[in-house]
Image (spheres, rainbow, N blue to C red):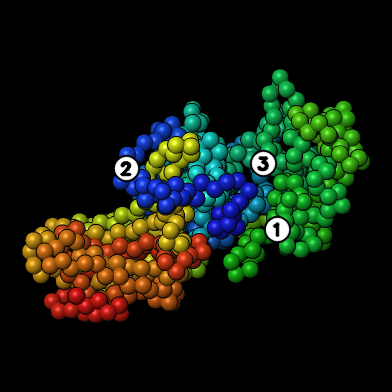
Amino acid sequence: MSEARTLGAGPVPRDDVEPLSCGDLLDPEAKCISGGTRTYDESQIFNFEIPCLVKRNNPKRQAQQPSANQVEWAVDQAVHGALTLQRPANWHDTGLPAFSPQGLFPKPNLTGGGDIPAQVVLGILAQESNFKQASWHSVNGTAGNVLQADWFGNGASIHRYPSRLNSDCGYGIAQVTSGMRDFDGADMFDSTEAGAIATDYATNIAAGMQILAGKWNQLKALGMEANDGSPQWIENWYLALWGYNSGVYTNPAEPRGLGFFNNPANAQYPPDRQGFLRATFDDAAHPAKWPYQEKVLGWAETPHKTWNWEPSYMVPDFPGATALLNLPTNYGLFCSPSVNNCTPGVANPCPAMNETCRWAGSVAWITGQNETNASREQLRFPVGSPESALVAKYPSGPCMTTPDGTPGTIVIDDLNGREDVYGCGAFPNKDQGKFSLQFGDNLIVNRDDGTFRATPYIAQIDVHQLGAGYNGHVFFTHNYPSSDYFHKVTGRWQLNPGYLPSGDKPGGKRFTVWIHLPNHGAEATVRYTTKPGPNVEGLGPDTCTISQANRTQGKNSWFKLGSWRFWKGGGVEMDNVHPDGGTGDANVAFDAVAFVPVTTPDKGNCNMGQ
């Protein structure tokens, strides 16, 4: 994701550049409009709102990253209709009612009978998501936002405003899209279905399998099949996989069949190519040389690797000792002037590149199909096996701890009292303070030249949730230069005013301030500022600059800033911009802050001591 994480200008003008348009000296724009009238076009703001049903950064909709053994178990069960385990009500603190993956999305019936081979589904999951239900930020066992290809519809860029029209609402390991948008009408999933698709890898697989079966059945209805048409042979899913990616055209008023983009005769694919992943695993780094169905079948043949480079799943039951699928190499089979306006053997076989190039025929490259020339599935987990145990890379974060056990300690967590997927339970101190995030400088303004300044809509793009740290949850973003208000994210841990004296009372209330840092997801150098609140003594804020990476050292840990006195309105603040600059690469984590009541100053690690 190079463009999504770099600060360089791309080919399209960036939306996150602040013009020097303020006053005679041409200061930054925000200097003039920060206190002025804010006018904006509500229709434009609506265009920034994302249509996907399950929203980002909702702790009630975290997806836990499954390990490969769990994914293979779910597929082995799903293809035989046995993915019927029960998720209890409020599973992983989602608030959802009890559900079963194939209770919500039953095993689909194939026209003519039979089952989808397990390795076909596993190949799709490897190609679609790299076996990830949660964002790529989340490693095995860690929760986070559900995986999305381009949630904001801006080319996965952190420099462009969201685009409702272009947002990709494909969710999770199977990238389920249809039904997951607020404009899908009668086909829109209900809250339980959508929530389960987003949070449960097993349900996502069950829903994705229905999509694949639908393509198989559509092709059967058009009289299109591969080889002998039996679903038991993995090779026979070539056409259905083609349609899974680019769709099956069934409108009788126009040419029907499969689009030319994934036609293996398409000139964009080298005609002398070897099978995907057969020569080297590096094929995965430049997959554009193969049509979609060949990539999926390549993954079925050569398993995806786990984070520690182990095969993620069983290979198929290959014919004889070949250890290879029997895939077509004569791509002229899919090219016929009478079928799809395609001329075999020429440099540009279908120059029209429109609906007239759709493939609408059956094709056979295996004669007398049997176990000596075609491949069947091979299961690792017998049908009816219980769910495989999660193999987590990191241990979960601590629940309800305090830095030193002092009675009366106030912990303000970024969850604000909500539970998380690790079962920490209801937070007991949620009324003692509040955590909040501010995106950008909160300015939404129409400019005179017709462009827009809406920093909250840019800054939110690079904010994520992760199942790490205190109570198993942090928000994180990345570090940026101090002048970059479009990407500035400010976290505030605000003490409940009811626990503090008013500003006209001398003395204040003294606390030693500790910050909690997660065992991963915290890397940048940041500034924590203790703000005493308005007070008669004129005591002002103090700031401590620390490296989150150096202080956490890969462990969940409390770090003592020092003690400070607080009045109503007091608390701690931290943001992701820094005067020494930032590259947009180092993680900035917002975790918990503890306020330990003390009577004497404690300078801590930051020499505060007030």
Q: Residue furthest front?
A: 24
Q: Please state which amino acid type lies under the numbered disc 2.
A: Gly
Q: Position of residue 476 (x, y in %)?
A: 42, 60
Quadrant for the N terminus, please: bottom right
Q: Which quarter of the picture shows residue 554?
A: bottom left
Say which residue label 1 marks.
Answer: 284
For this view, does 244 lie left or right of residue 430?
A: right
As helix, strand or loop, the secondary structure at mark 3 comes to helix
Q: Residue at x 42, y 52 (%)?
A: 25
As helix, strand or loop, the secondary structure at mark 2 comes to loop
At label 1, counting other C-alpha atoms closer than 10 Å, the crowd grade (few under 14, some 14-19, many 20 or more) is some
At label 2, counting other C-alpha atoms closer than 10 Å, the crowd grade (few under 14, some 14-19, many 20 or more) is few
Q: Position of residue 164 (x, y in %)?
A: 50, 37
Residue 60: tell me if it is visible: no
- Badge 1 vs badge 2, beta-carbon distance below 8 Å: no
Q: Residue at x 57, y 60 (%)?
A: 68
The numbered mark, 3 or 1, whose residue comes first in the sequence reads 3
Q: How many marks?
A: 3
- Calculate the distance from the C-alpha at mark 3 to the C-alpha at mark 1: 17 Å
Q: Is residue 588 above or below residue 63?
A: below
Q: Please state which amino acid type lies under the numbered disc 1.
A: Ala
